[in-house]
Amino acid sequence: MFKICKRYLVHFQKSVFRGEITPSNLLKLRNDLKKVIDKDSDFIAIFKMTGDYVFDEEVIGVRSNNQESLLL
């Protein structure tokens, strides 16, 4: 997954990537990640800015029941 994310975004820290991405490249990134993810144990969260202080979260994989979404 690291190599896939590195193709589209900038590695920020540990398992965090960030950057601007075109809608078509976001679609490619999603498709590439879905090919390698273990949907029963892996968790990927994609945060998209939809406004100045508004974010949208997309989840690929499974989130454990006791996890909360927190973006600092």
Image (tube, rainbow, N blue to C red):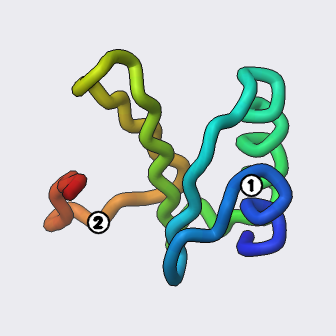
Nearest the viewer among 11 and 15 is 11
Q: Secondary structure at mark 1?
A: helix
Nearest the viewer among 69 and 20 is 20
Query: Residue at the spot x=56%, y=54% of the render?
Result: 18
Q: Secondary structure at mark 2?
A: loop
Nearest the viewer among 49 and 46 is 49
Name the quarter where the C terminus is drawn.
Answer: bottom left
Q: Amino acid at mark 2?
A: Ser
Whether residue 31 sits left or right of residue 50 in the image: it is: right
- Residue furthest to the bottom in view is 14
Number of other residues with Cα within 10 Å of mark 1, as a class: few under 14, some 14 to 19, many 20 or more? some
From the top left corner, tell me how far across and down residue 55 is, in percent.
Answer: 32, 30
Whether residue 32 sits left or right of residue 14 in the image: it is: right
Circle 1 sits on which residue?
A: 33
Label 1 and label 2: CA atoms lie apart by: 19 Å
Relative to 70, say whether 38 is above or below. below
Query: Residue at the spot x=14%, y=66% of the render?
Result: 66
Relative to 53, say whether 69 is above or below. below
Whether residue 60 sits left or right of residue 5 in the image: it is: left
Q: Amino acid at mark 1?
A: Leu
From the top left corner, tell me how far across and down residue 43 is, in percent.
Answer: 48, 63
Relative to 14, say whether 64 is above or below. above
Number of other residues with Cα within 10 Å of mark 2, as a class: few under 14, some 14 to 19, many 20 or more? few
- The mark found on residue 1 in the picture is none
CB-based contact (under 8 Å), mark 1 and mark 2: no
Query: Residue at the spot x=23%, y=26% of the render?
Result: 53
Query: Residue at the spot x=57%, y=61% of the render?
Result: 17
From the top left corner, tell me how far across and down residue 12 is, in percent.
Answer: 54, 70
Circle 2 sits on which residue?
A: 64
**Residue 51: quarter of image:** top left
Name the quarter where the N terminus is drawn.
Answer: bottom right
